[in-house]
Amino acid sequence: MTNYENYLTTVEQIYPVVFRKLTTPWHIEYRDALPEQNPKGCLDINLVAEDATVFHRLKISANKAEIWSDKQAVNNALVEYIIRGAARMAPLRQAAYRKNFAYWLESCLQVVQSVVIRKAELQQAVSDNAYPYPSKVKLNGDYLPCWVLCAKEQQLMVSVIDRSGQFGLTRSVDASQLVDSERWFEAQVIDSAEEASDTATEYVKDLLESTEKHDDSEPKLVDAVKHPSASTLSPVVSVMLMMGIVVAFFVIFKFQLGF
């Protein structure tokens, strides 16, 4: 068995592990404002499971609101795209890919939706089981690690992993610019199915824990100013009262010491 065949076999074993841990179905929730409330700005949305767990976060422009309608059910093809990418990333030990695992789980659709305009294009981009996959692309004479996201107009859309180790700009390249998969994987260190399963499980666990700690219900000062109510003002008033007590203490302390 070649290293590439070993990789493919490992991915097949990892996919159901990740799939079981990412609860479906999901739906879309706007975090701050609906498109009509912020027609020119950037909008924040969550992809949320039925148990209210936030699995994915995106920023979209208002002109793409048709693709991401509030309360709309998330197409299973999108969820499966995320899971495919995670399963194909888990066996790779190289830092350029491993350190992006958390980003892939929580925000990978950010780079995908940046290359499509219409809903049908997004659906087509994520429905092809051939994508996404890791590779290296030749740019300006150098081969750089990348993720091949989808095909578009007889070109491949890739996201290059830059020197900081993060997903960089998405660009269109010719297939001939990629290293042949069989040859590329011969030089890669591939974890066993058990190790890769542990990796995927740990990252999904971290994602769920970070979601539990992320509480959007806590009102901010700007909420109290824009939308005053008992729910928004009470916590803010409490903080201001505590600050007032601290300041008063130091004023009295300074007065008692005579300076």
Image (cartoon, rainbow, N blue to C red):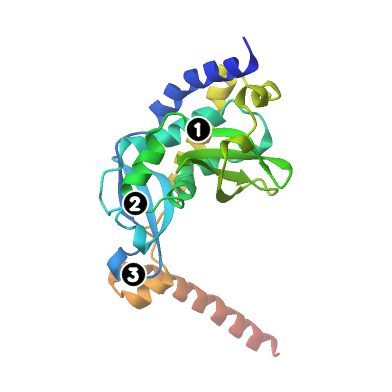
Of 19 and 113, which appears nearest the observer? Answer: 113
State whether residue 83 appears in this view: yes
Residue 226: quarter of image: bottom left
- Name the residue that disc number 2 marks: 118
User: Badge 1, how many Cα within 10 Å: few under 14, some, many 20+?
Assistant: many
Nearest-to-viewer mark from 3 and 2: 2
Q: Earlier in the sequence, mark 1 or mark 3?
A: 3
User: Badge 3, how many Cα within 10 Å: few under 14, some, many 20+?
Assistant: some
Q: Residue at x 42, y 29 (%)?
A: 129
Mark 1 and mark 2: span between their CA atoms? 25 Å
- Name the residue that disc number 1 marks: 86
Mark 3 and mark 2: span between their CA atoms? 18 Å
Of 209 and 20, which appears nearest the observer? Answer: 20
Residue 74, above or below 135: below
Q: Earlier in the sequence, mark 1 or mark 2?
A: 1
Spot occupied by residue 137 in the image (x, y as percentages of width and height): 64, 39
Of 239 and 3, which appears nearest the observer? Answer: 3
Nearest-to-viewer mark from 1 and 2: 2
Nearest-to-viewer mark from 1 and 3: 3
Q: Earlier in the sequence, mark 3 or mark 2?
A: 3
Spot occupied by residue 174 in the image (x, y as percentages of width and height): 57, 40
Q: Residue at x 61, y 33 (%)?
A: 135
- Name the residue that disc number 3 marks: 39
Q: Residue at x 58, y 20 (%)?
A: 7
Amino acid on which the number 1 mark rests in the picture:
Ala
